[in-house]
Image (tube, rainbow, N blue to C red):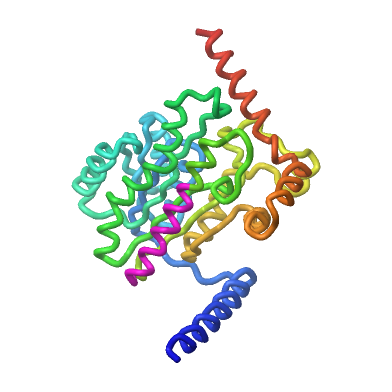
Amino acid sequence: MIFLMDLQMMVLDVIYFIIRNSIRIILRPRTKPIDGELVLITGAGGGLGQIFAQEFTKHGAEVVLWDINSSSNEQTAKLVREKGGKAYTYTVDVTNREDVYRSAELVRRDLGRDVTMLVNNAGVVAGERMFDCPDEMIERTMKVNCHALFWTVKAFLPQMKAQNHGHVVTIASVLGLFSTACVEDYCASKFAAVGFHESLAHELLAEEIDGVKTTLVCPYIVDTGMFEGCKIREEVELFLLPPLDPQYCVEQAMNAILVDQPLVCIPRLTYLPFLSRALLPWESNVVTYRFMGSDKCMYPFIEAKRQLLNSAIKVE
């Protein structure tokens, strides 16, 4: 009898959340205030990290900027301060867990407070076919895109849980939800990042820690130069899936973060291949990839990376 009652409640809850989230697509829920929050952003020296720092500043948050490149990190801090915000820079190698833990303690000592929002944004890609890619580059991709998530969350989440207040944001990729050829290192690391984030979210819910929120951000290819040369079918790219403008990508991610949205795919069209991967036969997805040019979209990207490397070698 209890089983049937629980089953009934589950079905009602499922229907309720489907209706609620459908309504939220049309009627945007109220955003939460984040003024005064202390936001730590990894990979803050450029690309999306630099824009995230400025966007959080617009909403009144203070930002802690972590990057392995100190000069680019200071440039981000300069942009934040020009907008009247507060920025604190630290040169950190997020692949080194001891460096992460040491820097986390340093942040707490320097600022006299705990980080309340963590944005795991740092990411890399090797840009080589698997059998041409040095093992060290594959390991680096996994360390930056996946292993670093463990170290940063272990460094900052306990304080969030103790205060029942915080937010963990993981910048993953649509290539953590579905894959394509010749970026095995990147896809493996982003699938791992998605799995890590979702397991963490379930853990917080199971422990009934309702004050610590999580948001998983899965953008399509962003025009930051990271995937320079990547090319799908011309008509599809022109009318459906052009590379994302970095500012637009961050704004959409911020919209999700500010309403505690658990998952956001950018653009919304990329929810479709995520669903088709689960619902359609493998062969159906393969022919769709071929039609869109997604099956070989990384070929020109890898060639562009190789030419860039060869040019650098010739200059030396």
Residue 31 appears left or right of 234 = left
Judged by its main secondary structure, the magenta piece is helix
Q: Is residue 201 magenta?
A: yes
Q: Position of residue 280 (x, y in %)?
A: 69, 57
Tell me where the magenta segment starts and ends, as one range: 192-208
Please report the residue visible at 29 percent of the width from the left and 51 percent of the height from the top.
Answer: 154
Residue at 28% in and 41% down: 100
Q: Residue furthest right?
A: 235
Question: Residue 73: image x %, image y %?
Answer: 39, 35
Where in the figure is residue 101, as x and y percent of width and height? 25, 43
- The extreme bottom residue here reads 1
Q: Could you say which quadrant of the image residue 200 lies in? A: bottom left
**Above or below 235: residue 203:** below
What is the x, y in percent for residue 121? 44, 44
The quarter holding residue 38 reads bottom left
Quarter occupied by residue 296: top right
In the image, 264 versus 8, the foreground residue is: 8
22 drawn magenta: no
